[in-house]
Image (tube, rainbow, N blue to C red):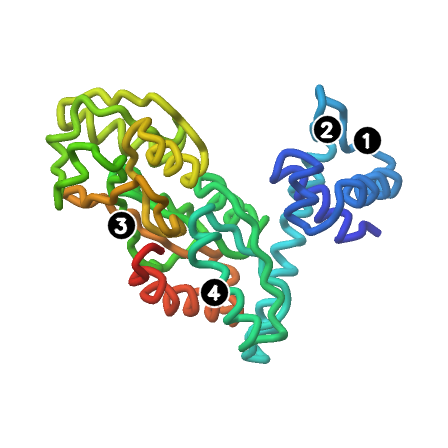
Amino acid sequence: MLDLQRLRALHSVAVHGSVGAAATALGYTPSAVSQQIAKLERETRTVLLERAGRGVRLTPEAQQLVVTAQELLAIMERAETALEERRGVPAGRLTIAAFASSARGLLPGVLADLAVRHPALDARLSEVDPHLSVGLVARGAVDLAVAHGWDIAPLVVPAGVEHAVIGEDRCTLLVPEGHPFAGQRVVRRAELGGQRWVCQPPGRICHEWLVRTLRAAGYEPDIVHQAEENPTLVALVAAGLGIALIPELGRGPLPPGVVEVRLDPTPVRRLSALWRAGAARRPAIAETVRTLQEHWPRVANQPSH
């Protein structure tokens, strides 16, 4: 008989693309995941993983087994949802994927609140890029995701996934002290031409927004420095190396030498919680979404959230 935990390990490798990433998602060590799959290979008398450079790839037999694993995990999820719904109390493990600034600025308070009020709920957070987290929910790799959409890149919700709006996060212009914009209360988009920018790299929504918005205003952005993390971008602005457009959530207090200016119209990204339709009745999902929405006004109204 096939072992469900071993199938879960194989499914996680298929979803996340590597043994290490699967281990992180499952809360195991890479060695433990490899051992689970090795045992599954002995059970099935089938090679499931092959070396591919420094990583691994699934064999065709493994891909077929992953389909079966996903079906079994969906059945298990429905059963767990029915039991939890019957009890009416948030309980069991709840895996949450959230993008970096929400994991830093919103989730700590939410998770602490849930831990106090619902000790039977084992909520576990992973920091995941928003363009990946929605797919993880759809494939059953995580239970809940916190993602965002912009005016130029609305959040796409796949079939079988439900969502609820958490709130709207404003973006503001950060400039070095002494910059001509630093003395203005508001900067209009038409004034942004000829500036040196620091920005996230291509492929990130903030980068796409900046490029599209400035081109629509008739300017080609001069992006002189790129960094993944917002604190790095803020440090580059503080050093006088450019200006940046950065969301307020999770940004934290600004260092000396950085001035915040409102951009008109103000860019806004909308935060949403997403979960599979099959788990919509689960009290843990409903309570976590409610808690996210309840905490948002407090976070959004902080001076430097």
Relative horizontal placement of residue 202, taking residue 88 as reference (left or right): left
Earlier sequence position, callout 4 versus callout 2: 2
Residue bearing the label numbered 1: 47
Q: Nearer the viewer, residue 218 or 133?
A: 218
Mark 3 crowd level (few <14, some 14–19, many ≥20, 10 Å Cα): some
Q: Which mark is residue 170?
A: 3
Q: Which mark is residue 59?
A: 2
Q: Nearer the viewer, residue 106 or 305?
A: 305
| Alpha-carbon span between mark 4 and mark 2 | 42 Å
Give the residue type at disc 1: Val
Quadrant of the image occupied by residue 202: top left
Q: Amino acid at mark 4?
A: Gly
User: At label 3, which amino acid type do we have?
Assistant: Arg
Element at label 4: helix
Residue 63, given in percent of the width and then of the height, sits at 68, 34
- Which residue does the numbered mark 4 point to in the structure image? 109
Alpha carbons under labels 3 and 1: distance apart: 50 Å
Label 3 SS: strand
Name the element at disc 1: loop
Label 2 sits on a secondary structure element that is loop
C-alpha gap between disc 1 and disc 4 = 45 Å
Q: Are marks 2 and 3 in contact (CB under 8 Å)?
A: no
